[in-house]
Amino acid sequence: MKKIEHSIKTLCDVKQCLNSQFIERDDAVHIIVIAILSKKHAILIGEPGLAKTAILKALIKHISGFKLFDFQMTPGTNINELMSEHTSNKMGIDNCDIAIIDEFFKGPHSTLNSLLAIMNERVIYTPEPRKIPLLSLFATSNEKPDKSSDLNLLPLYDRFLFRKEILPISDKDNFKKLLQTNDEYNFRNISLSAEDVNILIQNYKDVHIPNDIFDVLYSIREGLKNKQVSVSDRRWKEIITIIKVNAFINKRNCVLPVDIKALESSLWTFYSDIRAVRNIVNRELVKYSTQSCLKT
């Protein structure tokens, strides 16, 4: 138990360190953390120069013992270029713990589709299937998906359980702070070990989900269907992991309605869905809160 408490505290210290230096990026940091602990993939979408890649690299460097593969896609990238035997430092997507791929959708279809089994099954074929240690793949993209996007890429896009929109800093005081902040990230000697991460991964699964939380999730699903926002049954099943992890790192053994807010980045597919998702989640949580008050 003490090991779990120590791991959670260190994780909170890491998040606080990142949040103090990456302004208005608290939600992105939180999503990246949950993605790693749930062993899922995430994509950060936004214009260039919004610290998408910098946040990812800074967080991963806080974790000692993790192997990072960092790559930038181009229209000519071949899947073999992502493999360790073809990289100068012998680090590739086949032998890393975390992969960061910038300009993800700039890659050719053949390369992107080759990543499907890697992301879904953590398997590569050389030509025999071989398991790889990849925990999470993080992608960044400047391209905003909409309903005119290439439908052939939807199965791959669906493998990103987390989709986070990164926006420019909006608050005036925060903008001023940005201009005065040193560009060099200060790690403050805060280190989360690979063992700490594994402890957290192994223990969040015991978190309990009460029946009323399932009722709220069902109401959210029905609300999204009425707005023609499609969320597959498989994605709903995977989403359960998110609320469990969110409760666990907040030192709770039971999911609360507040944990459902962490789902917003996992319920939209196209950019036009974001507002509907946010409104429906908030509406159902308010409704639940009101009904709970009336019962008491």
Image (cartoon, rainbow, N blue to C red):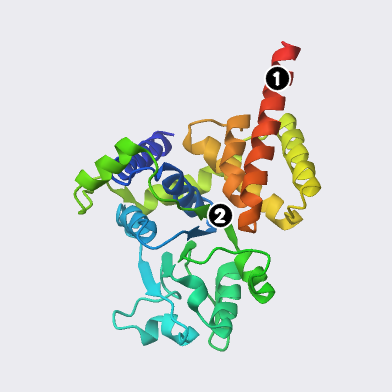
Question: Quick one: label 1 or label 2, which is nearer the N terminus?
Answer: 2
Q: Residue furthest top?
A: 296
Q: Is mark 2 on a helix, strand or loop?
A: strand
- Residue at 52 percent across and 43 percent down: it is 203
- Residue at 42 percent across and 38 percent down: it is 4
Q: Is mark 1 on a helix, strand or loop?
A: helix
**Residue bearing mark 2:** 162
Residue 78 is situated, as x and y percent measured from the top left of the image, at 48, 87
The one nearer the camera, 97 or 101, is: 101
Identify whether 70 is placed above or below 276. Answer: below
**Residue bearing mark 1:** 290
Identify whether 4 is placed above or below 120. Answer: above
Q: Which amino acid does label 2 sit on?
A: Phe
For the C terminus, the quadrant is: top right
**Is residue 66 visible in this depiction of the protein?**
yes
Identify whether 226 is placed above or below 98. Answer: above
Residue 258 is situated, as x and y percent measured from the top left of the image, at 58, 31
